Image (tube, rainbow, N blue to C red):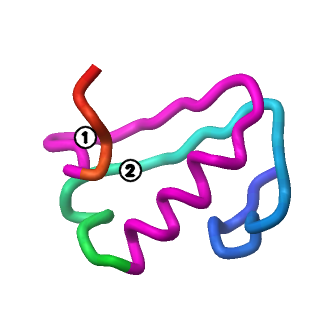
Amino acid sequence: MILPIYLEKGLEFDGVIVYDVSKERYSSLIDQKLLYIACTRALHRLILFWQGQKSRLIPEC
């Protein structure tokens, strides 16, 4: 199932893939809230993809 982030609120999934978590895409307060929603929907597996610099909202691992 592919859903936009704003429709995911209140739902949970076994795995979530978030595409293009780059510095350019997720930088504002609204972006921060959307990324939080997307990342917290995953019950077991979360996969984040980015090209170039990742968003500052993603911690170093």
Q: Which of the 4 image quadrants contains residue 58?
A: top left
x and y percent of residue 29 in the render? 33, 77
Q: Circle 2 sits in a helix, a strand or a loop, which is it? A: loop
x and y percent of residue 42 in the render? 70, 38
- Amino acid beneath label 1: Gln
In magenta segment, residue 33: yes
Q: Which of the 4 image quadrants contains residue 59?
A: top left
Q: In this view, does 48 lie above or below 12?
A: above
- Amino acid beneath label 2: Asp
Q: Is residue 54 left or right of residue 26?
A: left
Quadrant including the C terminus = top left
Residue for point 82% across, 41% down: 13
Q: In this view, does 43 lie above or below 20?
A: above
Which label belongs to residue 51? 1
Residue marked by disc 2: 20
Mark 2–mark 1 Cα distance, whole angstroms, equals: 7 Å
The answer to whether mark 2 and mark 1 are in CB contact below 8 A is: yes
Q: Badge 1: few (under 14), some or many (20 or more) residues near its Cα, within 10 Å?
A: few
